[in-house]
Amino acid sequence: HAIMLWQYYGTTKKEGGLDGLIENLKNSDMQWGLQGIDLTRFAVIEGDKCNLFVRMAKRAANIFSSKEREAIRFGAVKEIMALVPYR
């Protein structure tokens, strides 16, 4: 079983800039992470405890409803936009 540990987006000065970052936040499937990432690190879980880990991860994933997940994503985009200077 593979899990995403972290991602590094890089500079917002690359092609698309902040608008690209915001679009990536809006359009990404967070199960797989943010689109447009420069670097992503995964871990692989194997062995006897893998099935237990997968069951625990699935349970944790169901803590929030899809409506709540969208509210969290919207809040993140809103916080980022608050940091962007007026254009």
Image (spheres, helix red, strand yellow):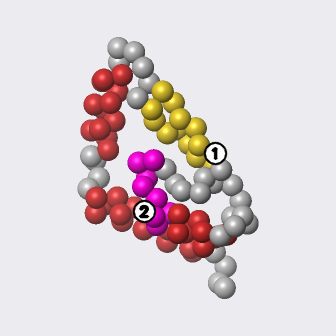
Find residue 15 and report its image quarter. bottom right
At a point 42% along the width and 62% down the height, the residue shown is 73
At a point 35% along the width and 14% down the height, the residue shown is 48
Q: Is residue 79 magenta?
A: no
Q: CA distance from mark 2 to mark 1?
A: 21 Å
Left or right of 62 on screen, residue 19 = right
Magenta span:
25-32
Q: Position of residue 26 (x, y in %)?
A: 46, 66
Find residue 41 and report its image quarter. top right
Viewer can see residue 37 = yes
Callout 2 amino acid: Arg
Mark found first going from the N terminus, 2 or 1: 1
Looking at this view, is 79 or 12 the one in front? 12
Mark count:
2
Depicted 61 relative to depicted 74: above or below: above
Q: Quadrant of the N terminus?
A: top left
Q: Which mark is residue 73?
A: 2
Q: Which residue is mark 1?
A: 39
Task: Residue lying at the far top in this picture: please name it.
Answer: 48
